[in-house]
Amino acid sequence: MAAIPTIEEEDARRPSRERESLVGEQTRLVNRIKAVLTRLGIRSFRLSLRSAADRLAAIRTAEGTPLPDNTCAELSRLLARLSLMRERIRTIEQERLRRLAAAPAAAASGLHAMVRLIARIIGIGFETADMLVHEALSRGLRDRRAVARYAGLTGSPDESGQRRREKGLARSGNARVRRGMIQLAWRFLSFQKDSDLAQWY
């Protein structure tokens, strides 16, 4: 039976989901800007600089000519949108850290305490911890198999007569949790190479 989340539980997931959406849009903008610049033979322009929009006038194409007017205007608009996306992402992250700092540390049963506890593990940041707590661990899942089923991390066997084969992950659960747990597994192998679990793997 599906457990329907309360309004407060659903509301607690909004910042993480909004940030995920903004990061996706930021990636699309960066790729679009790079595509426009690559068409003109420009590959060394650094979008991470705060003064990237001010440097547009100094950019030269592969032939040594300045950027065409319409292209320069389009890039200015795209860079303005990119700056807005980065500002919104930063606002969400700062608000989450403010809420975590404001929550009393003594409330061990609260979700904020769970986020802080998980974020103390090497290789897990606040974003992953927040997503895991609000998307999966706040639910009353029975055991680790229920967590795996919810995340879509169970196998999908194909059995017919004498033929038996494994078709990989089922991918039928929560995509955010599945993606986060797979990234978490790789981070665990990267940051905790000497742990017993990593050695066993």
Image (spheres, rainbow, N blue to C red):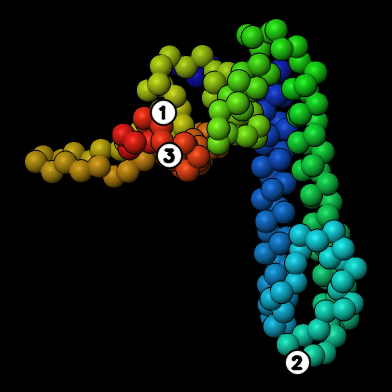
Query: In the image as oriented, which residue stretches furthest toward the left?
Result: 162
Q: Residues within 10 Å of mark 1 (few under 14, many from 20)?
A: some
Circles 3, 1 touching at the beta carbon (< 8 Å): no
**Mark pair 2, 1: CA separation:** 55 Å
Circles 2, 3 touching at the beta carbon (< 8 Å): no
Q: Is residue 62 visible?
A: yes
User: Where residue 181 sits: x, y (%)?
Assistant: 49, 35
Q: Secondary structure at mark 1?
A: helix
Q: Residues within 10 Å of mark 3 (few under 14, many from 20)?
A: few
Q: Identify which residue, 47 or 146, lies in the foreground.
A: 47
At 71% from the left and 74% from the top, the residue drawn is 44
Direction from residue 143 to residue 61 in the image, left or right: right
Task: Check disc 1 and give the amino acid type.
Answer: Ala
Name the quadrant containing residue 89.
Answer: top right
Q: Which residue is mark 1?
A: 148
Task: Check disc 2 and give the amino acid type.
Answer: Glu
Q: Which mark is residue 193?
A: 3
User: Where residue 103 sits: x, y (%)?
Assistant: 76, 15
Task: Check disc 3 and give the amino acid type.
Answer: Lys
Q: Which residue is mark 2?
A: 63
Examine the rendered structure and indicate whether residue 159 appears above or below residue 6.
below
At 68% from the left and 44% from the top, the residue drawn is 21
At 54% from the left and 21% from the top, the residue drawn is 137
Q: Identify which residue, 199 or 72, lies in the foreground.
A: 199
Name the quadrant containing residue 124.
Answer: top right
